[in-house]
């Protein structure tokens, strides 16, 4: 059983400000969710194989092919700053 105090406590932890009617509504909603979970806990799932996804998934791969690309000089032509043949960017780690 979830009490209004439980909902207010969790809301305070999450830094969520709730009005009085919202606390009542959330208390009721959470209670119904827990009742449904209790119904699910009564089901026999011993013969059901655990799954991570409802549908079977597989990665789609394509073969790597060498294709023409920009040369170093072409890439550096469009850079804002460059130094010694490399892109020069602002330092992001101190």
Image: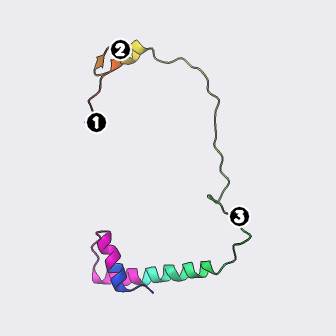
At label 2, counting other C-alpha atoms closer than 10 Å, the crowd grade (few under 14, some 14-19, many 20 or more) is few
Please provide the residue range marked out in magenta.
9-27
Most common SS among magenta residues:
helix
Report the front residue among 44 and 21. Answer: 44
> Compared with residue 13, is residue 20 higher up or lower down, i.e. above or below?
below
Q: Secondary structure at mark 2?
A: loop
Residue behind mark 3 = 49
Q: Are marks 2 and 1 in contact (CB under 8 Å)?
A: no
Which quadrant is the N terminus positioned in? bottom left
Q: Earlier in the sequence, mark 2 or mark 1?
A: 2
The tag on residue 85 is 2
Q: CA distance from mark 2 to mark 3?
A: 56 Å
Q: Quadrant of residue 78?
A: top left
Q: Position of residue 84 (x, y in %)?
A: 32, 14
Left or right, 58 with respect to 94, comes to right
Residue behind mark 1 = 93
Q: Position of residue 25 (x, y in %)?
A: 38, 82
Left or right, 52 with respect to 28, comes to right
Q: Position of residue 48 (x, y in %)?
A: 71, 68
> Compared with residue 84, is residue 13 higher up or lower down, i.e. above or below?
below
Which residue is painted at 50% across and 18% down in the image?
Answer: 69
> Compared with residue 79, is residue 16 higher up or lower down, i.e. above or below?
below
Q: CA distance from mark 2 to mark 1?
A: 22 Å
């Amino acid at each position: 059983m979830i009490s209004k105090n439980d909902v207010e406590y969790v809301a305070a932890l999450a830094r969520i400000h709730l009005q009085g009617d919202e606390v009542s509504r959330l208390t009721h909603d959470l209670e119904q969710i827990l009742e449904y979970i209790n119904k699910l806990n009564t089901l026999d799932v011993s013969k059901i194989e655990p799954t991570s996804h409802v549908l079977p998934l597989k990665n789609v791969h394509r073969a790597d092919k060498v294709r023409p690309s920009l040369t170093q000089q072409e890439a550096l032509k469009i850079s804002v700053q460059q130094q010694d043949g490399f892109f020069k960017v602002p330092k992001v780690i101190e």
